Image (cartoon, rainbow, N blue to C red):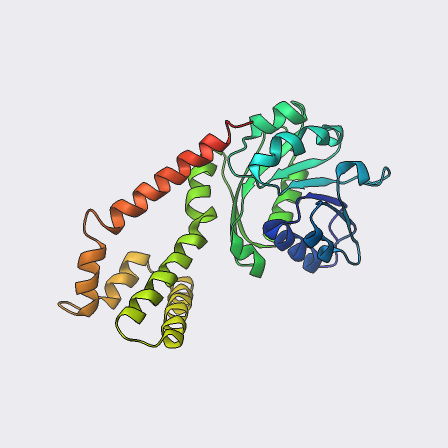
């Protein structure tokens, strides 16, 4: 692509902010100003990218076309209100868990153009999935810009019901952690069965990588792929009888997603 992204203001240069910035650089940037007081954020500086410690340090002439809010939701009550001065000219894209469009509009102004989105950490390798919802004042061109910004780090889907973003946060936002936990547990179980630690690590990681690749390449439902691995009266069937017992994985996963969804909603009420 030859068209560069317009001027952008990134509030928060942590892992997700840095991942998005890397994706934008590949897409082609005009100018990005990053607000982050941390020393680690300085490493993000480079051609077209400048780092400042606070909003007061943003150059007075800088006019971002979009502002991406990539700070923790607990910081939002302090970080968001001062940005209201841009509400008449810039699109706001929030990737903060829990903070609703109404919550943001109450602090930025009712006419602020806001897209709320939830990406996940595979964005760091451009393999993320982001689900987004556009507020009522977002113009079609602004929605397109939001899609371009978010698609730079992976797949992007829009929903019309904002309430879906809380379970989205629980499923795909936290999902990588659940997969990493599975790798951790497989590795530990392998070591318990006498497999050397180095081999156990390699087996656990490559099994998940390979299974994910097969899932990505196959049009079959995940349940069908699972059944294809499960020979009648075989070893996998014996293991799945334990994992799929009513009080095991089905209950644990459902309860975990319910708890994470509730926490996302609670974050929206704080501050």
In the rendered view, does 160 fall on the left or right side of 46? left
Q: In which quadrant of the rendered image does the C terminus lie?
A: top right
Report the front residue among 234 and 249: 249
The extreme left residue here reads 233
Q: Nearer the viewer, residue 242 or 164?
A: 242
**Left or right: residue 99 compared with residue 179:** right
Q: Is residue 25 left or right of residue 222?
A: right
Residue drawn at x 67%, y 53% as measured from the top left: 21
Residue 33 in picture, x, y percent from top left: 76, 46
Position of residue 117 relative to residue 221, above or below, is: above
Question: Which of the two residues, 119 or 142, is positioned nearer the viewer here?
Answer: 119
Q: Is residue 66 above or below residue 233?
A: above
Q: Residue 262 placed where, x, y %?
A: 40, 34
In this rendering, does residue 219 appear at all? no
The residue nearer to you, when weighing 262 against 68, is 262
Whether residue 173 sits left or right of residue 189 in the image: it is: right
Locate residue 75: give its quadrant.
top right
Residue 59 lies, in percent from the top left, at 84, 41
Task: Tell me how many marks there are.
Answer: 0
| Residue drawn at point x = 45 percent, y = 48 percent | 174
Q: Which residue extends farthest right?
A: 61
Q: Relative to 25, does residue 73 appear above or below in the rendering? A: above
| Image vertical order of residue 270 relative to residue 5, above or below | above
Residue at x 54% of width, y 33% of height: 99
Residue 22 seen in this snapshot = yes
Could you tell me which quadrant the N terminus lies in? bottom right
Residue at coordinates 26% horizontally, 48% vertically from top-left? Answer: 250
Q: Within the image, what quadrant is residue 241 found in? A: bottom left
The spot of residue 234 in percent (x, y) is 16, 70
């Amino acid at each position: 692509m030859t068209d560069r992204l317009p001027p952008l203001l990134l509030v928060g240069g942590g892992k997700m902010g840095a991942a998005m910035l890397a994706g934008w650089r590949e897409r082609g940037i005009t100018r990005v100003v990053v607000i982050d007081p941390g020393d680690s954020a300085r490493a993000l500086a480079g051609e077209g990218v400048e780092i400042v410690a606070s909003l007061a340090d943003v150059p007075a002439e800088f006019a971002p076309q979009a502002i991406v809010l990539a700070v923790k939701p607990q910081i939002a009550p302090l970080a968001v209100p001062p940005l209201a001065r841009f509400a008449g000219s810039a699109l706001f894209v929030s990737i903060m868990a829990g903070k609703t469009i109404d919550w943001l509009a109450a602090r930025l102004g009712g006419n602020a153009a806001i897209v709320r989105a939830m990406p996940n950490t595979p964005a760091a390798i451009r393999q993320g999935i982001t689900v987004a919802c556009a507020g009522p004042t977002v113009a079609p061109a602004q929605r397109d810009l939001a899609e371009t910004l978010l698609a730079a780090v992976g797949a992007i889907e829009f929903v019309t019901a904002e309430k879906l973003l809380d379970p989205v946060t629980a499923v795909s936002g936290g999902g990588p952690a659940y997969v990493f936990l599975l790798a951790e547990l497989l590795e530990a179980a392998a070591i318990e069965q006498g497999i050397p630690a180095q081999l156990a690590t390699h087996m656990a990681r490559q099994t998940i990588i390979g299974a994910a690749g097969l899932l990505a390449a196959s049009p079959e439902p995940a349940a069908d792929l699972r059944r294809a691995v499960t020979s009648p009266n075989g070893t996998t069937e014996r293991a799945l009888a334990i994992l799929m017992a009513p009080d095991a994985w089905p209950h644990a996963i459902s309860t975990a997603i319910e708890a994470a969804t509730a926490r996302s909603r609670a974050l929206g009420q704080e501050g």
